[in-house]
Every structure is written in C-alpha cells, then in structure tokens.
Image (cartoon, rainbow, N blue to C red):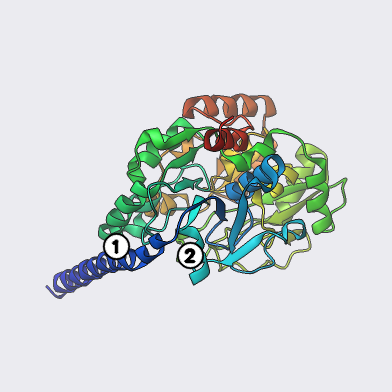
C-alpha cells in the first residue's frame, strides 16, 4: 500500500512539474516577443553546434561551404561557449555566448538559424525566419519522447515539441528511414525533411590526406601506423549520462588487428560529447581523442571503427572501411533505450565479449562487408551523395 501511495504522490508531483514547465515556456515566449520590435536581417546567419560546445558537425560544414562559395555576402555569427572554439582562420567571425542576452537578440533577428539539435521552444521565432535543424546523427536508437530516460517529462516534451515543430522550416535528412522516424518523433511534417544527406558526411566521400596528417600530428602518431577509433555512445539522457565501464581489452585488440590486417595499430578513444564520466585508462596504446572537436575528421583518419550503438556507424559506413560493434551491455541497452532499427539488422558484426570481438575481426570478410553495407544504405533509402552542403545552399539561396 505504501509503495502504491508513494508512486501516486511521485506521479502527481511529476505532473505538476510538467505543467509548471509548460506555463513557464509560454510566459518566456511572451516576454521575448519584445525582440519582434527589431527588424529581421535576412543576411544574418547564425550557427550553433551542440549548444555552443563545439565548432563541428553539420553547422560547421554548411558554414565552411558558405564561406567558400558566398564569401562576405552574408553576416556570419557563431554561438559558442568560449571565444577560442573557432579555428584561427575564422577568428574574425563574430561569436556570441550561447543563451546570453546578445545571443537571444541575434537569434530572434537573424534571417537564417542553423542548429544541429532541437530548436529551443521558448524562443518565439517569426514566420519569415528560416530555421534549419540539421540534427547530429542517424536514428538507429530511440530518441526524444520514445526513449525511456525522457519519459518522466513526456507531458511537457509533447508541448515543447509542438511549438518547436511550427518554427522549423527544414530538417536535413540522411535517408528515408530518418525522415519517417523524425517526422513522427518531432511531429514535423514529412515535407519539411530535405532528402540531401548530412553536410558533415560530404568529407567522407573522398580521401583527405591533409586531414589524416592533421589527426596523426595532433596525437604524435607515426604515419605508417594505422588507427582504430573506439567511440562508444552515451547512456541515459544528455543531462545525466550514465557511466560507461571500460571493458575493452586494448592490447589484445591491437594484436588481433595486426594479425588480421598486417599493420601496427594505435587506438584513439573518443567519448561522446555528453559523457563526462570517462577517465583515460592508463595504457600506452590508448590515446584519448575526446578533446578533438570534429568527429568526422577522426572518422576520416581512422582505418577501423569500433563502437556500440553510436550513429557514427552510419557516417563511417560511407568510407567502406571496417567497423565492428562491441556491446557488452546489449540486453540492458535494449531495455533502457531501444532501437528503431534492430541492431541485428545493421551490417556491422556484433560482439558482446572481448573473445567474440577477436573472433569477429579474424573472420572479417571485406567483400561481404562492403556488399552488406551497400544493401543497408539501399534498405534505409540513403540520400548521402557527398553533396549535401551544396544542395542545402541551393535550396536556401537558389542554385
């Protein structure tokens, strides 16, 4: 009886918290409409990646394409948490601290706003502003209201989702499956999804020796050595990521890679941007690359990718280089997070133990792997062609 009463009380408290959040949402939107007194500058374009944490992902590659092809036609502004996030060559570009008063002023008067995450529902955008949501990965795993970690906030999330959906002009889509899932999850009409691929993946359709040199120089890696990138995703929600126990046998793995592929390997470890729990394992063969801002450059430099449930497998698959899944907590992850596309249907060989991972590497068949990857792209209706940034700009500005 006490348990039932406690559950009832918890549910009522959670309900009222959700109602308060909704009321606060609309109150803030009303207050911020004061910025509507200012005119919209159609030449002003604002970019933001991961809430100002990085200069990376789709916004970076759209920005660089615009700089190269449109020059000073537009006024570019980056929303960042620190002024030194932008590379030296772009230090002349104006920056504003994310969610500062100056940021709100700019974002509510900009002609184009480019995010790689959900649009903030408490910002009252106007109809003639163009909001482009690029998102930041393929929807293999469940997200937003479909994911268990967010269920307690489902009432307020549905309301904020409705408000955000009205503001968005375009959503960039990597494939047909993403559009179908995204439209349902975010309540955004399917016609707003652009079938162009992700601009951040354009770089993966060509060999970039300069990028490989850049990564290897950053971590003092001999050019003759190969790189295996280990990049697990985070658990829980982005505010409270669960700790990820490091159980990969690094030395055994690197020896196995040498036995299979005939090269000496080093391992780069890349933690997810929301994972704050990982401390670098003391191993001379393991290099932490979590401070490297651009995951796509690491994917360019990597010769092999090992991950678990990360959507980086979609990006990396277009290089046609080997990828392996190491999922020691698979059953738990299925229960807590879940998938839109069953992991067993992915074209990447899955292992739940170090022993199984070694076996998978040793029996890896490159021809069968490439065939499976191409079939996977076709099954999900891939839109990736390596021209996403150009296609988006053609849509926005006329091609």
> Which one is in front, 101 or 385?
101
On the image, the x and y values in percent for residue 397 come to 56, 36
Q: Please tell me which residue is depicted at 67% across the width and 24% down the height of the picture.
A: 367
Near mark 2 (Cα within 10 A), the count class, few <14, some 14-19 or many ≥20, is some
Q: Image height check: is 347 above or below 114?
A: above
Asked whether the viewer can see residue 100, the reply is: no
Left or right of residue 186, residue 196 in this image: right
Name the residue at the left extreme. 1
Could you tell me which quadrant the C terminus lies in?
Answer: top right
Near mark 1 (Cα within 10 A), the count class, few <14, some 14-19 or many ≥20, is some
Left or right of residue 358, residue 138 in this image: left
Quadrant in which residue 299 is drawn:
top right
> Which one is in front, 315 or 359?
315
> Could you tell me how far apart the alpha carbons at marks 2 and 1 are, in whole angstroms?
32 Å
Mark 1 lies on a secondary structure that is helix
> Which one is in front, 157 or 276?
157
Mark closer to the observer (2, 1) = 2
| CB-based contact (under 8 Å), mark 2 and mark 1 | no
Left or right of residue 87, residue 14 in this image: left
Left or right of residue 285, residue 176 in this image: left
Disc 2 or 1, which lies upstream in sequence?
Answer: 2
On the image, the x and y values in percent for residue 382 come to 52, 29
On the image, the x and y values in percent for residue 21 come to 28, 67
Residue 173 got which mark? Answer: none
On the image, the x and y values in percent for residue 370 come to 64, 27
Residue 105 got which mark? Answer: 2
């Amino acid at each position: 009886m006490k348990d039932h009463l406690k559950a009832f009380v918890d549910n009522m408290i959670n309900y009222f918290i959700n109602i308060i959040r909704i009321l606060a949402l609309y109150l803030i939107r009303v207050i911020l409409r004061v910025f509507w007194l200012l005119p919209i500058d159609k030449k002003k374009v604002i970019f933001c990646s991961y809430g100002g944490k990085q200069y990376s992902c789709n916004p970076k590659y759209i920005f660089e394409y615009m700089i190269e092809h449109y020059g000073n036609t537009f006024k570019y502004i980056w929303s960042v948490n620190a002024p030194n996030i932008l590379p030296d060559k772009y230090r002349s570009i104006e920056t504003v601290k994310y969610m500062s008063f100056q940021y709100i002023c700019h974002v509510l008067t900009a002609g184009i706003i480019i995010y790689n995450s959900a649009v903030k529902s408490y910002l009252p955008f106007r109809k003639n502003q163009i909001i482009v949501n690029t998102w930041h990965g393929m929807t293999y795993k469940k997200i937003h209201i479909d994911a268990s970690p967010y269920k307690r906030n489902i009432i307020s999330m549905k309301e904020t989702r409705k408000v955000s959906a009205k503001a968005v002009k375009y959503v960039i889509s990597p494939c047909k499956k993403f559009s179908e899932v995204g439209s349902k999850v975010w309540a955004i009409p399917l016609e707003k999804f652009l079938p162009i691929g992700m601009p951040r993946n354009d770089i993966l359709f060509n060999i970039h020796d300069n990028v490989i040199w850049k990564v290897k120089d950053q971590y003092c890696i001999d050019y003759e050595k190969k790189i295996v990138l280990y990049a697990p995703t985070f658990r829980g929600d982005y505010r409270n990521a669960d700790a990820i126990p490091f159980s990969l046998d690094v030395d055994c793995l690197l020896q196995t890679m040498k036995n299979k592929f005939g090269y000496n390997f080093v391992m780069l470890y890349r933690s997810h941007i929301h994972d704050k729990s990982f401390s670098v394992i003391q191993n001379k063969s393991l290099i932490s690359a979590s401070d490297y801002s651009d995951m796509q450059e690491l994917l360019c430099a990597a010769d092999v990718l090992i991950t678990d449930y990360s959507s980086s497998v979609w990006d990396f698959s277009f290089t046609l280089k080997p990828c392996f899944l190491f999922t020691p907590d698979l059953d738990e992850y299925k229960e807590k997070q879940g998938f839109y596309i069953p992991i067993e249907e992915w074209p990447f060989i899955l292992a739940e133990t170090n022993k199984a991972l070694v076996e998978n590497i040793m029996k890896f068949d490159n021809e069968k792997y490439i065939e499976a990857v191409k079939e996977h792209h076709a099954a999900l209706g891939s839109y990736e062609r390596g021209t996403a940034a150009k296609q988006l700009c053609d849509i926005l500005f006329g091609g």
